[in-house]
Amino acid sequence: PGWISVTEHKISQSFDLTRVMFSRGNVTEKKRFGSLVQQGEYVLDMYAGIGYYTLPALVHGNAKHVTACEWNPHALNALRFNLKMNRVADRCVVLEGDCRVTLKELVEKCDKGTAACHIASFDRISLG
């Protein structure tokens, strides 16, 4: 009902303003994080929200892959939409649920050989 779109540093972010938070106050930190990420890196975003740090890592940092964790269903919906809108969805896996649980499950799958291990090994971690 309250979907809006915001563009910061050439990254489009859409979300339902009545369901998720958005902060313009950290715009410089999001840009800085994108510049810290190096091309080809594997990044973990433990609290992805609508893609505050996931998107700069992919768009500006040209990360090879981002594993994004989020448990708010409204933020997850916006995150998936934003990944597609910014044409980077193919380089991101979204783990739905509490990151303490989903990351443990991912590592266990990797240990058993049932998940691609590159998505469980990271060069850089964002704690949002």
Image (cartoon, rainbow, N blue to C red):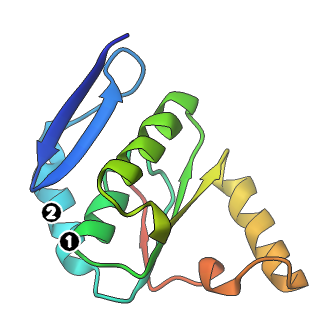
Secondary structure state at the residue bearing disc 1: loop
Residue 68 visible to the viewer: yes
Q: Position of residue 64 (x, y in %)?
A: 42, 82
Query: The residue under label 1 is which amino acid type?
Result: His
Indicate the quadrant containing the C terminus: top left, top right, bottom left or bottom right.
bottom left
Q: What percent of the width, then of the height, locates residue 37?
A: 28, 79
* Circles 1 and 2 in contact, beta carbons < 8 Å: yes
Q: Is residue 91 left or right of residue 63?
A: right
- Where on the picture, by quarter, is residue 112? bottom right
36 sits left or right of 97 in the view: left
Instruction: Give the residue type at disc 2.
Output: Lys
The furthest residue to the top: 1
Which residue does the image show at 60% across and 84% down from the upper left? 121
127 lies above or below 119: above
Distance, label 1 to label 2, CA atoms, is 8 Å
Q: Would residue 49 be seen by someone viewing this image from the given angle?
A: no
State whether residue 74 is above or below residue 86: above
Reading the image, the residue beneath label 2 is 31
Q: What x and y, as percent, mark residue 78?
A: 42, 37
Which quadrant of the figure contains the N terminus? top left
Residue shown at 15% from the left, 68% from the top = 32
Tell me the tag on residue 126.
none
Residue 86 falls in which quadrant of the image? bottom left
Q: Which residue is mark 1?
A: 60
114 to the left or right of 3:
right
